[in-house]
Amino acid sequence: MRSSPTSQALRRGLLALAATAALLPSAFAQSPIIIKFSHVVAIDTPKGKAAEFFAKRAAELTKGKVKVEVYPNSQLYKDKEEMEALQLGSVQMLAPSLSKFAPLGVKEFEAFDLPFIFDDYNDLHAVTQGPVGAKLLKKLESRGITGLAYWDNGFKVMSANKPLKAVEDYKGVKMRIQSSKVLDAQMRAVGALPQVLAFSETYQALQTGVVDGTENPPSNLYTQKMHEVQKHLTVTNHGYLGYAVVVNKKFWDGLPADIRAALTKAMAESTKVANDTAFQDNQDALAKVKASGKTAIYQPTLGERFLLKKAMFPVHKQMASRIGEETIQDIYKATNFDPNKM
Ligand code: LMR
């Protein structure tokens, strides 16, 4: 018996459906895995450049199986929201500054905020590229986060609309800080009035006088145009600001092993990009601030810097129980620092 044109059409339709269904798994495997990478700084910064580089190398090394979408400049999320978004899986990758992990309950990261804890990048790398740094990243796992790398930025300068030379100059000055209790204590130690604000809100807060000043590495200050609303800058290098690159743990663990290996390689190369450019980027930014003629740059004398250190150093002891004495001692040991010689 010949089938009717209607049943033939039905059969053809069912076959087409079955063929599509059979194709589905491979079609899915071919569609790129999307990694949304959100951050809060400009593209032309160590973090911004390393994130772009990671996106490029991730695509190359996975032969297009992974597409990293980078959202810079708080385009997608601000500081606090981005941490929540990572835990919820709305974004897969971030590189928040080390000061922003304590609100997750990992207070040990605030050790990086201790004033004068690192003399230079060598001290810093002894921690971030050694066992102490690895141990700290492990602590994120219980929060559903996997730490992949540390990316450098740099040493912070202080800025305000008045010169900040002597310790007394900080008295009563409203200073924007990141969400870190150590930075709060550091500012209070010199009589300043710290105020936590999202990075994306800082320029406007400076412009409108909600705060008088702030601290940041020059590259962040310059690329956010903060120098246009700050008359004075002091090269105090009193503390460090850098990043941990983190991924949603469930997402990372669920990736095929070959993809994870390729991304690990892309990350290692991107870390080199961040760390190789950070020092120079900050030098260049300082030169550009100077060239703008909008902000007077002051290099403190050794004596002035020593007095600032003396005023801020008690924060190490004051914050020890919050951060954890063990972490602080681990850092002292890694950097060959003897606090008794202060
Ligand atoms: C800040 O909030 O000042 C910095 O953490 C911004 C950044 O990501 O460098």
Image (spheres, grey):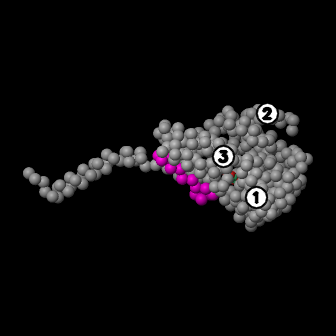
Range drawn in magenta: 64-78
- Which disc number belongs to residue 274? 3
- Looking at the rendered structure, the kind of residue marked 3 is Ala
Q: Where is residue 179 drawn, in percent x and y?
A: 70, 51
Our reading of the magenta stretch's main secondary structure is loop
- Looking at the rendered structure, the kind of residue marked 2 is Asn
Residue drawn at (79%, 64%), measured in percent from left and top? 294
Which is more toward the observer, 196 or 136? 136
Which is more toward the observer, 316 or 245? 245
Q: Where is residue 297 drawn, in percent x and y?
A: 83, 57
Residue drawn at (32%, 48%), measured in percent from left and top? 21
| Residue identified by numbered label 2 | 336
Residue drawn at (67%, 50%), measured in percent from left and top? 46
- Reading the chain from its start, which is encountered first: label 1 or label 2? 1
Kindly tell me whether residue 211 is visible in this rendering.
no
Asked whether, in this view, residue 31 is left or right of residue 341, the answer is left
* Label 1: which secondary element: helix
* Label 3: which secondary element: helix
As for residue 24 lying within the magenta part, the answer is: no
| Residue identified by numbered label 1 | 288
- Looking at the rendered structure, the kind of residue marked 1 is Lys
Residue drawn at (74%, 36%), measured in percent from left and top? 331
